[in-house]
Amino acid sequence: MARPRIGTDEWVAQVEERVERAAGLRGAALATWERLPLGARYAPFVAFAAIFPLLTGSEYKERVALNALLFALLVLGLNVVVGWAGLLDLGYVAFYGFGAYVYAFLSSTKFDTHWPAEATIPIVIASSAVLGFLLGLPSRRLVGDYLAIVTLFFAQIFVVLASNGHRLSLLGFKGPYDLTNGPNGIADVDRLDVFGLELDSVQSIFWFALVATVVVMTALHFLNESRTGRAWRSLRDDPLAAELMGMPVNRLKLLAFVFGAATAGLTGSIFASVQLGVFPGNFDLPLLITIYAMLILGGQGSLPGVVIGAIVVTAVLEALRTPDQARWVFYGAVVLGLVALMRPWWRLAAVLGGTIVLGVVTFAAVNEVRPAWTSGTIEGGGLASLLDGWVVHPEFSTRLGNIGFVVLVAAVLLLVRLHGQARSAFLVPVLYLAAFVWENRLVLEPSVTRILLLGTTLIVLMVARPEGLLGTKRVEIL
């Protein structure tokens, strides 16, 4: 047995042996990808994004793509604070709203100021960075839950000020003064006007947002490769060890807040020009949940990962707005999950076949015993026509759907406690119950369903793949 060598760090010397390498064609492709320069890696994707509005010919799809870019910018900024520095910032949305309101103050009819974008956007970025610095001052000594509580409190303060900003006063001695127009928000915000060129179409704003995303992503890439980026990752992995190594931990936290807030402020200014107005309801808790879902899905710390997470979540949430598209998302996700997780293949075939048979038998039995419970119709075409004679769907579907939802939650909790063949057998009725709840309750309220599916996805992903799609696995020494 080889003895440890004196004066040699075995952990560092054997790092290449510990790194998991993909084999075969996938491994060769990954190795080639890593050898490519940064521009060659992402140029095809940027080129495709640039011509996407020309290929679609649909303003609706262009607007969805624009929303995806705005979310990508937001998540890139959040990735600095959470993914690199490891700071649980729950007040991040406030910087986004602050940037939108500052842009509205300088470029709208609110104060009758109409500054061009080349003057307004730098002011928005600088003021958002200063606000991030000010929030970081009292938060730099906090970690974990304490930091989360303080930053969440900051977000609530922003929403309250934006909602009640139409009656501000100076300690009650002067006022009231209307700053934000309260819950009615600020309307008539100017479109982006860059060096005399007014961006008055969705296409033009999309290209502007694409350029902003590429610039921010490139700048953050080089920042991540710098000493500051490496120090952030050290702070994330072990703050105490980073401090013992002489790293300025408090200064690093302030820098993370500054860069994250500046990116969020830039995004807010573009958002305000797109919406032609800003309102307090645009910056509430569901938005925070959404961007955290994008961050976790793509992989914390990975720039391309968080952008992919933003695109995927935006597309899925948009598809969930209509029942027909939502069905394809739901059943497609269920099938893909089963294909990815169930082995051997005969067990997967048995579960899917058993679910189909169970549905046919259940529908026929219920139709014989109580026809009123099968008298409803699943509206839509395509997939809906296949489900119409398979899923029990009464006319009073909402009440049974509520009961089924409670039973489904209990069944899922029981399912995770089972193992082997018992789990496979019990999975069949759980899948059919999930289809019943989806068709009779969840698909009827897309606004609620979107949040539920986001939360469920986060839970499943954190258990099955906590590093996300493109995130790096962390090694813990126990």
Image (cartoon, rainbow, N blue to C red):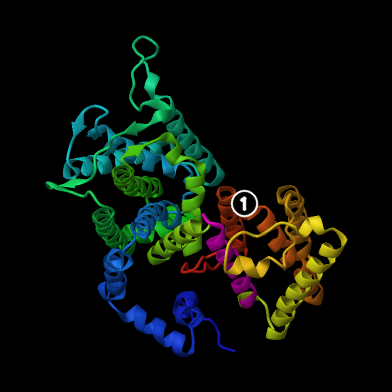
Q: Quadrant of residue 7?
A: bottom left
Pick the front one: 200 or 345: 200
For the point 39% across and 14% down, the residue is: 171
What is the span of residues highlighted in magenta in the rendered image?
Answer: 321-339
The picture places residue 110, in percent across and down from the top left corner, at 27, 28
* Visible residue check, residue 171: yes
Q: Is 143 placed left or right of 132 in the picture?
A: right
Pick the front one: 102 or 147: 102
For the C terminus, the quadrant is bottom right
Classify 10 Å Cα crowding around label 1: few (below 14), some (14-19), many (20 and above): some
For the N terminus, the quadrant is bottom right
Q: Is 113 placed left or right of 331 in the picture?
A: left
Question: Which kind of residue does numbered mark 1 sit on?
Answer: Leu
Pick the front one: 86 or 420: 420
Q: Which residue was labeled with disc 1?
A: 444
Residue 325 in magenta stretch: yes
For the point 24% across and 27% down, the residue is: 111
Residue 254 in magenta stretch: no
The picture places residue 238, in percent across and down from the top left corner, at 49, 57
Q: Quadrant of residue 226?
A: bottom left
The picture places residue 444, in percent across and down from the top left corner, at 62, 51
For the point 72% across and 68% down, the residue is: 390
Q: Does residue 410 sit above or below 264 in this rendering?
A: below
Q: Is 184 placed left or right of 270 in the picture?
A: right
